[in-house]
Image: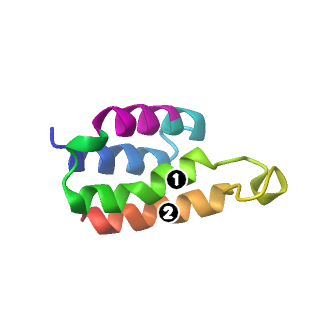
Amino acid sequence: MSRKIFYTQLMCNFLSKSLDTEEFQRDFLENFKAEGELFKQEEYEALEGVFYSLDMYSPEGSEAFTGAVSYDELVSDVTQAIKKLS
């Protein structure tokens, strides 16, 4: 399976709530960190925003700490990444 398909499926599973936020965060971050140098430029550019959002995600949003990403912001970033990979 290509990386593009893997990440698109992973993100779609999150948006459809087949994966909860913690599962998605764990799976995405583990794979992205392990494969970081192997991405094609366009794949990396599409996914780096999701990586940042997951790294800064807090269920409490900006109330948790400065720069924290809310669930709605995370969903928006994931949706944008899927469009970029399409």
Residue ID at (47%, 49%): 51
Pointer 1: residues within 10 angstroms few (<14), some, or many (20+)?
A: some
Q: Where is residue 14 drawn, in percent x and y? A: 48, 46
As shown in the figure, which amino acid type bears the numbered disc 2?
Asp
In the image, is residue 62 above or below residue 4?
below
Residue ID at (64%, 61%): 72
Q: Which residue corresponds to mark 1?
A: 52
Q: Where is residue 25 drawn, in percent x and y? A: 52, 38
Residue in the foreground of this view, choosing between 46 and 67: 67
Q: Which mark is residue 77?
A: 2
Q: Is 3 part of what is drawn in magenta? A: no
On screen, residue 38 versus residue 62, left or right, reads left
Q: Which residues are drawn in magenta?
A: 26-35
As shown in the figure, which amino acid type bears the numbered disc 1?
Tyr
Task: Please report whichever mark, 1 or 2, sits nearer to the chain's N-terminal start.
Answer: 1
Q: Which mark is residue 74?
A: none
Secondary structure, magenta segment, majority class: helix
Q: Secondary structure at mark 1?
A: helix
In the image, is residue 81 above or below residue 32?
below
Residue furthest front in the image: 37
Q: Quadrant of the N terminus?
A: top left
Q: Secondary structure at mark 2?
A: helix
